[in-house]
Structure formats: C-alpha cells, structure tokens
Image (spheres, rainbow, N blue to C red):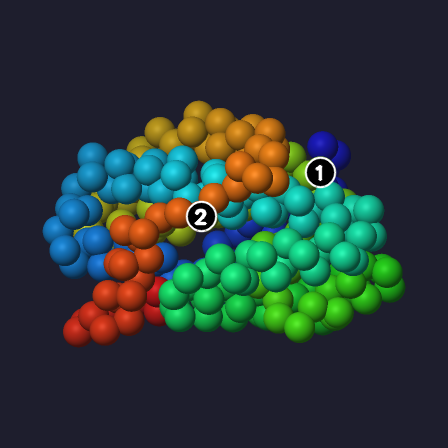
Amino acid sequence: MNATALLHLLQLASPSLPIGAYSYSQGLETAIDRGWVKDPESARDWISNNLRQVVALFEAPVLWRLLQAFEGRDGAAVALWTERFIAARDTAEFRAETIQMGYSLGKLAIELQVGDASLLAILQAQPELPLPTAYAYAAVALQVPHEAALLGMLFSWAENQVLVCVKSVPLGQVAGQRLLLSLQAELQLAARHAQELADHELSNWAPGLSLLSMQHEEQYSRLYRS
C-alpha cells in the first residue's frame, strides 16, 4: 500500500472521524451492567467471541462484498448487500446505530468531495445508508486496498469495544492497550475468514446479543446509545 492510501485508511479508521462511533457500545454496556464483563479477562472473552461469532461471520463479509461492488461500479450488488445488512439489524438500537453512522460518513464523504460521479450515483441511490455501505464507498473512492480497508474496519470496531471497557468496566488505559494488542492475530484471522465465506455461509445468528440490545433500550442508567 502506498503512503497516500495508508494515510487515507488511517483517517477513515480514526476514532476522531465525526460519525459518532464513541456513542455506541453494541450491547456491551448491558453486559457490563449485568456483571458479565468486569475485568480484563472477561472483556477479552466478550470482544473475541463477538468478533468470531458475529462480526467475522456477517458484518465483515458484507463489507467485503460492498467493497468489490463499489470497485466494479455494480449498483445492483451494492443495493442487494445494503438491503440485506439493514434487514439483519434485528433491534431498534442496532438499526438506528448503523443508519446514523452511515448517514454521517456518507455526508462527510460528499462534503469532502470524495468519489467520482459513478460512485456517487450508486451511493445516492440507496434509500437508507448503513455504515458498511458508506465505509465501502469511502474506501474505494480513496483508493484504499480492499484487504486494508477490511482490516481497518475490524480494528476500528475492536478499538471502540475496548474503549467502552476502559470507560465503563472500568479498565486502566494500559490494560486497554494490552487487550487491543492481544487481539491482533484474531483480527487478521477474521479478515481472512470474511474473504473466504460463500454467500450461503453468512450468518448474524446471535440471539443473546440481540436480547442484550433490547434490554439496553430500557436500561435505567446508560452512557451509550446501543
């Protein structure tokens, strides 16, 4: 990857990107409230299990397909995987999260004049814009290699989960960085696995996580929006 593409990826995956990622815990806040995540070991178990059983099996492979679809200017494929991803958000909070962040990233990319007319037409043709679609658009428009863009998304997801644990378990800053460092091999494995799955192998089956998300909607005290 050349220096320009690397810098684009760093900006795209940065926690300072103004799309509101810090506002969401994706069910983790409720797991902390229940006492299931309470120390570095349980925090690592939670993040690792979600990575292997949810993100690597659905969100990452959908992103991979969206990257390829935008690269090929295949509007039908973008629409298909966008629709399927939104349909797979099985709680109100999960759906609102991806639509809000996708809208924010898409709006940012347009304001920064990222992408040519053919890419922009595909983006603007989507009735609703989830985060993976907006991210894939930006990565292709900025000419970030697909493998790097996928790994960047996975790292950004893991970093946000670790930050939730640092703030809410709470874990110390050093413990949080140690946790993030320990996940590197699993993030690489998840990226490879996402590229290998056939369409019929994708699955977002995670009923326990869905129940936590629904419970979070009525949680008495919370910092996060999901």
Residue extending farthest left? 35
Q: What residue is drawn where x is 67% and y is 56%? A: 80
Report the number of discs: 2
Q: Secondary structure at mark 1?
A: loop
In the image, which is nearer the foreground, mark 2 or mark 1? 2
Q: Quadrant of residue 22?
A: bottom left
Looking at the picture, which amino acid does disc 2 mark?
Asn
Looking at the picture, which amino acid does disc 1 mark?
Pro
Q: Is residue 175 above or below residue 15?
A: above
Residue extending farthest front? 200
Q: Which residue is mark 1?
A: 145
Q: Is residue 62 visible?
A: yes
- Quarter of the image for the C terminus: give it: bottom left
Could you say where residue 118 lies in the image, as x and y percent from the top left?
86, 60
Q: What residue is drawn where x is 60% and y is 29%? A: 196
- N-term-proximal mark, 2 vs 1: 1
Query: Which class describes the residues within 10 Å of circle 2: few (<14), some (14-19), or many (20+)?
Result: some
Looking at the picture, tell me which residue is in the foreground, 219 or 172. 219
Distance between the Cα atoms at labels 2 and 1?
A: 26 Å
